[in-house]
Amino acid sequence: MSNPRKKAMNPDAVAVPLKPYYSNCVRSEAGPLLWISGQVALDRDGKLVGKGDLRAQAVQVLENIKGILADSNATMDDIVKVTVYVTDIRAFNDIADIREKYFPEDGPSSVICEVSALAWPEFMIEIEAVAVVP
């Protein structure tokens, strides 16, 4: 499924991505961009989802992003960049399969980094994103 608003690329000048859900770079045409603030594992009522469960939190975070995108008539395929903050870098491998479900091909450029804390002590993951929108 190709997105005309973005082109995921993996130039030969660098190693292939470590995981299949992201690309080394993404090119997009100038146009409307949606900058999504860091999303955490809160449901629409502001209740924590997945206390102590990184995988449940990751799904909630990605579903929040998906919902924000839908409000702008966009999808996960429109995301060109994500920054993933985790309180334990083991998440790089522990949620790889979840991220692959949300970004099955032509994934966004991506950064993942371990931080000492997030806004609430219960949060284990936060993701911010940039998307090209219609």
Image (cartoon, rainbow, N blue to C red):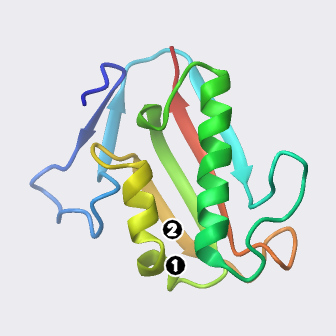
In the image: residue 128, left or right of residue 17: right
Task: In the rendered view, tell whether residue 47 sits above or below residue 72.
Answer: below
Please report the residue visible at 66 percent of the width from the left and 56 percent of the height from the top.
Answer: 61
Q: Secondary structure at mark 2?
A: strand
Please report the residue visible at 57 percent of the width from the left and 24 percent of the height from the top.
Answer: 33
Residue receiving disc 1: 91
Q: What amino acid is found at the position of numbered circle 2 in the picture?
A: Ile
Residue receiving disc 2: 112
In the image: residue 118, left or right of residue 62: right
- Residue 133's spot in the image, x, y percent? 52, 21
- Look at the numbered discs 1 and 2 and tell me whether their residues touch, using CB distance below 8 Å: yes
Q: What amino acid is found at the position of numbered circle 1 in the picture?
A: Ala
Q: Quadrant of residue 80?
A: top left
Q: Quadrant of residue 125?
A: bottom right
- Residue 101's spot in the image, x, y percent? 40, 54
State which quarter of the image contains the N terminus: top left
Give whichever of discs 1 and 2 has the lower sequence position: 1
Q: Secondary structure at mark 1?
A: helix
